[in-house]
Amino acid sequence: EILLSRALERMEPSGTTAMTDRASALREAGRDIISLSVGEPDFPTPAHVIAAAKDALDRGLTKYTPVIGTQQLKEAAATHFERDLGLPTAAKDVIVSAGGKQAIFEALVATVNAGDEVVIPNPWWVSYAQIVKYAGGQVVPLVTQADNNFCFTARELEAVITPRTRWLLLNSPGNPTGAVYSAGLLAEIGEVLRRHPHVMVLSDDIYAPLNYTGQPHRTLAALCPDLKPRVCTISGVSKSHAMTGFRIGVATGPGWLLEAMGRLQSNSSGNACSISQAAAVAAFTGPQDFLDEWRERFRQRRDLVVQGINACPGLSTPSPDGAFYCFIDAAPLMQTYGNDEALALHLLEHGVAVVAASAFGGVDGFRISFAADDAVLEEALRRITLALS
Ligand code: PLP
């Protein structure tokens, strides 16, 4: 007999992981599958980061650290928040977790009560909605459209806020859509939030350096310092420094919230891996110039994919301004394939793993990651075109 808690029964397994696992199983069975379903850079972790990890082992940094992170990493993260996000931050106002995901989980679970509403721009990153449901909150979708580059407007935000709204989630650059919120739009959002002082904001800036607009990264707490006491800003090294396996995320926000997050962490995972923390110090304080090259290569791949997808009958996508995903509309194909999951399985049959839009709370489409080599992307586009012809 399976006896789960009611909290866990509300949570579903991650839809992106499910597709990645299915693609791996097919590959192990000898099939030639291109996986465009995962959310990680294909570039190797920078050499100076690897060296720092090895050095940490040699120096015997293999024991517990303070639960919410080493002083060195909190200082390095504070530097990162100020340099890369424009957000002046003190080391004492930083918490280090096992990935950005853990920080997001802790912030929501520490604050959401049964029936509290959490506004999430939709389509959304899979885990936001699952965590809110686990915590007993109500997910309030703020539906965005491709023709507005998947950004919501200040007016649309104001329309969904109620006295029960606990949080607004912001994710710029965004997964799965690549949405980037401009300084002007963030200022308008700030205006709305000033009228609703009970709403907190979780700003997930994990893709901050991967922005192709040519503009510096903008974040709410930096643009509207008066709102800082109710903004929790999340960042990390997973996406920016190709360190997904190291599991390091960082967050800053009001002291009472960081204390609550640390309380959860002290009674669950404890500190993030000591070796990974040392590597993350090197990531934040070492050279950042490789990012210019990565950004340029991602931008070129984006252009390749956007052009290839829009040339494919039945598919369309705007050009994403950030991150490394295209959120593709396939509504004209739904009559043929039935639904987006059937379409994703059809593409998998033709050798390309993608994630159906419904995994992100979307409809009639799919997400692909363009964090793959040009030749791989070209072959994937060829297979997709063939599969749909
Ligand atoms: N936030 C967003 C929007 C993401 O796409 C991801 C990873 O997929 C995360 C957070 C979590 O990153 P991490 O690997 O640091 O936990």
Image: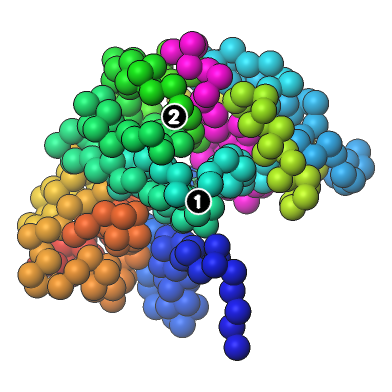
- The quadrant of the picture occupied by the N terminus is bottom right
Mark number, residue 114: 1
Residue 236, horizontal then vertical, whole percent: 58, 35
Dot 1 or dot 2: first in sequence order is: 1
In the displayed structure, 10 sits above or below 3; it is above
Q: Which residues are magenta?
A: 224-251
Residue 214, horizontal then vertical, whole percent: 33, 19
Q: Which is closer to the viewer, label 1 or label 2?
A: 1
Mark number, residue 346: none
| Nearer to the camera, 306 or 84 | 84
Q: Give the amino acid at mark 1.
A: Ala
In the displayed structure, 134 sits above or below 305; it is below
Q: Residue at x 27, y 28 (%)?
A: 158
Q: CA distance from mark 1 to mark 2?
A: 16 Å
User: Could you tell me which secondary element the residue under label 1 belongs to?
Assistant: loop
Q: Residue at x 46, y 36 (%)?
A: 166
Q: Is residue 288 left or right of residue 132?
A: right
| Nearer to the camera, 222 or 177 | 222
The question of residue 237 being in magenta is answered with: yes
- Look at mark 2 in the image and give the residue it sits on: 199
Residue 350, horizontal then vertical, whole percent: 26, 73
Q: Give the amino acid at mark 2.
A: Val
Residue 287, horizontal then vertical, whole percent: 62, 23
The question of residue 81 being in magenta is answered with: no
